[in-house]
Amino acid sequence: MANITLDDLDVRILNQLQKDASLTNQALAEVVHASPPTCMRRVRRLTEAGVIEKQIAIVAPSKVANTLTAIIEVTLDVQSAEKLLQFEQRIDQEPSVLQCYRVSTGPDFVLITQVADMPAYHALVHRALTAEANVRNVRSFFSVHRSKFETTIAVSATV
């Protein structure tokens, strides 16, 4: 993806969509003080450039089911580029893994997972981690309370 230059209107659009992506183009245009056609072109440009990855609904886990959030540190035996990529590709296929970060200084990966209960957690760890020959260490932390969850990225103009 090529770098894209963001101006003040792009920033206003991105900030507003991060707050509420369900706005109609007309409503978005009114909030960011642009014409609807201009607003639509800008959103399309930002989407095509990969700045806007997708628009989603964020579901509150506590409202739909009793779930367990586990933050899992994973250390691999071999950290070659090929082995790191293989691990990422395997983890990408796991629906209960919400986020996967390759990190430095410490474990190789940190995973944020959402599972139904402890048996589901154990099944995930066995299926995706301990059954894999290249995983050296797995360390898990279980959330007892979530005090903050935010998805907004600070955006500024790059002109």
Image: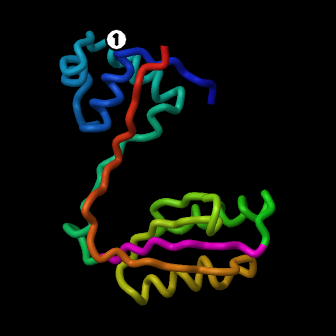
* Residue appearing at x 26%, y 77% in the figure: 66
Instruction: Residue 118: name its quadrant.
Output: bottom left
Q: Is residue 75 above or below residue 92?
A: below
Residue 90 in view of the camera: no
Picture residue at 19% right of the left edge, 21% below the top: 31
Left or right: 127, with 65 as reference point: right
Q: Is residue 126 above or below residue 51?
A: below
* Quadrant (top left/top right/bottom left/bottom right) for the N terminus: top right
Q: Residue at x 26, y 12 (%)?
A: 34
In percent of the image, x 74 and y 81: which residue is there? Answer: 133
Task: State the residue in front, 84 or 94.
Answer: 84
Residue 6 point in image, percent of width and height: 46, 19
Q: How many marks?
A: 1
- Within the image, what quadrant is residue 33 found in? top left
Give how far across and how far down residue 65 sits, in percent.
25, 74
Q: Which residue has dot 1 on it? A: 38
Crowding near the residue tagged with mark 1, few <14, some 14–19, many ≥20 C-alpha atoms within 10 Å:
few
| Image position of 89 with respect to 45: above or below | below
- Where in the figure is residue 28, as x and y percent of width and height? 24, 24
For residue 18, side relative to residue 108 (left or right): left
Of residues 44 and 148, the one nearer the viewer is 148
Quarter of the rendering containing residue 131:
bottom right
Residue type of the residue flagged with mark 1: Thr
Q: Which residues are magenta?
A: 67-77
Most common SS among magenta residues: strand
Q: Secondary structure at mark 1?
A: helix
